[in-house]
Image (cartoon, rainbow, N blue to C red):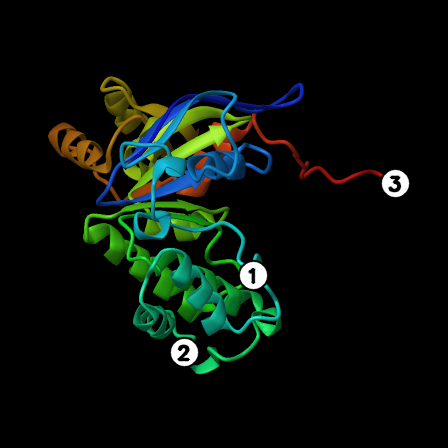
């Protein structure tokens, strides 16, 4: 388990993390989301003892990371896939890590096979592609068979097969009861990989909870209907809390009501339905709404005039 309590980190006058509190529970993959400059990397560095909080505490399995005697056996992490001595082979890199925590060399060969890079184990890490470096970084995180794992953008540079492997593998780790925290900008992938998410912006907590709960809190989506008696249908649905988002001759888009409720009310009122469909908002939609005022850089879709 990872616990942050009122963590603040300042670099001079710049507040990178602002009174941040959250808990990452075992048993599920937790996504860690935020715009560029939101403080995600700084937060992960504080969890791992690489930066010290200005205020507050970051705890891993009941104690600060720096108090763990053999950290690779308790916590595995991948923050920068290219942070490897370029002249060392992949196997020698992992052997050096293993020796630092008294992990047997046999475990090095296990994680090389597990991550699919045993065939290039003797190649220099500096010659690895980004995707291969990601697999080497994941192998290093798994080296001590830890209960708690942190990954920062682990699927960057991976091909579709590699992305699917990471997703399914991280989920299997969580199903074993491990704590898995994953930071990523790929909302479509995070919606498939994670169960819970933590969203921060400008160093502060914006939202946390299950993906379904957060999407529902942002409106959940809309229901579209088509009926020859649209006006009567809208009047009936509005009396039960529905709100018209848009409407045309015989179609309408509604919020604040489920498709099941629309079907039941239309049946009771004797109003024919030609079409009825639910349009659920995506995690990306919810993320954009949540972080709209927290993005460091924004762009406009408006075309400039010449």
Say which of 37 and 299 sits in front. 37
The residue most toward the left is: 268
Q: Secondary structure at mark 1?
A: loop
| Res. 288 visible in picture | yes
Q: Is residue 128 left or right of residue 21?
A: right
Q: Secondary structure at mark 3?
A: loop
Query: Which residue shows up at 52% across the image and 39% down it?
Result: 41
Badge 3 crowding class, 10 Å Cα cut-off, few under 14, some 14 to 19, many 20 or more, is: few
Say which of 108 and 3 sits in front. 108
Badge 1 crowding class, 10 Å Cα cut-off, few under 14, some 14 to 19, many 20 or more, is: some
Where does label 3 land, which residue? 306
Say which of 108 and 175 sits in front. 108
* Nearer-N-terminus badge (3/1): 1
Badge 2 crowding class, 10 Å Cα cut-off, few under 14, some 14 to 19, many 20 or more, is: some
Say which of 47 and 174 sits in front. 47
| Res. 247 visible in picture | no
Count how many numbered circles sit on residues in the image.
Answer: 3
| Foreground: disc 3 or disc 1 | 1
Where does label 1 land, which residue? 84
Spot occupied by residue 284 in the image (x, y as percentages of width and height) = 45, 42
Spot occupied by residue 167 in the image (x, y as percentages of width and height) = 35, 58
Q: Quadrant of residue 15?
A: top right
Please identify the quadrant where the N terminus is shown.
top left
The residue most toward the right is: 306
Q: Secondary structure at mark 2?
A: helix
| Foreground: disc 1 or disc 2 | 1
Where does label 2 land, which residue? 118
């Amino acid at each position: 388990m990872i616990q942050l309590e009122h963590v603040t980190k300042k670099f001079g006058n710049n507040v990178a993390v602002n009174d941040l509190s959250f808990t990452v529970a075992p048993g599920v993959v937790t996504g860690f989301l935020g715009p560029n400059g939101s403080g995600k990397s700084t937060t992960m560095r504080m969890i791992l003892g690489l930066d010290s909080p200005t205020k507050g505490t970051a705890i891993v399995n009941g104690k600060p990371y720096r108090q763990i005697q053999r950290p690779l056996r308790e916590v595995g992490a991948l923050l920068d896939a290219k942070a490897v001595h370029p002249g060392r082979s992949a196997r020698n890199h992992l052997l050096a890590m293993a020796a630092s925590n008294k992990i047997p060399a046999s475990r090095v060969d296990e994680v090389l096979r597990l991550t699919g890079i045993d065939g290039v184990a003797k190649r220099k890490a500096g010659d690895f592609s980004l995707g291969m470096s990601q697999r080497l970084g994941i192998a290093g995180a798994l080296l001590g068979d830890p209960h708690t794992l942190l990954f920062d953008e682990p699927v960057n540079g991976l091909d579709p097969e590699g992305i699917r492997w990471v997703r399914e593998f991280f989920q299997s780790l969580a199903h074993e009861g491990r704590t898995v925290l994953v930071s990523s900008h790929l909302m479509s992938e995070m919606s498939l990989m994670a169960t819970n998410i933590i969203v921060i912006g400008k160093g502060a907590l914006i939202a946390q909870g299950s993906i379904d709960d957060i999407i529902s809190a942002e409106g959940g989506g809309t229901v579209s209907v088509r009926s020859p008696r649209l006006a009567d249908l809208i009047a009936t649905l509005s009396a039960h809390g529905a709100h018209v988002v848009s409407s045309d001759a015989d179609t309408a888009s509604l919020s604040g009501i489920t498709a099941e409720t629309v079907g039941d009310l239309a049946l009771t009122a004797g109003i024919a339905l030609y079409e009825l469909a639910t349009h659920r908002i995506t995690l990306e939609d919810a993320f954009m709404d949540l972080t709209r005022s927290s993005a460091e850089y924004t762009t406009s879709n408006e075309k400039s005039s010449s």
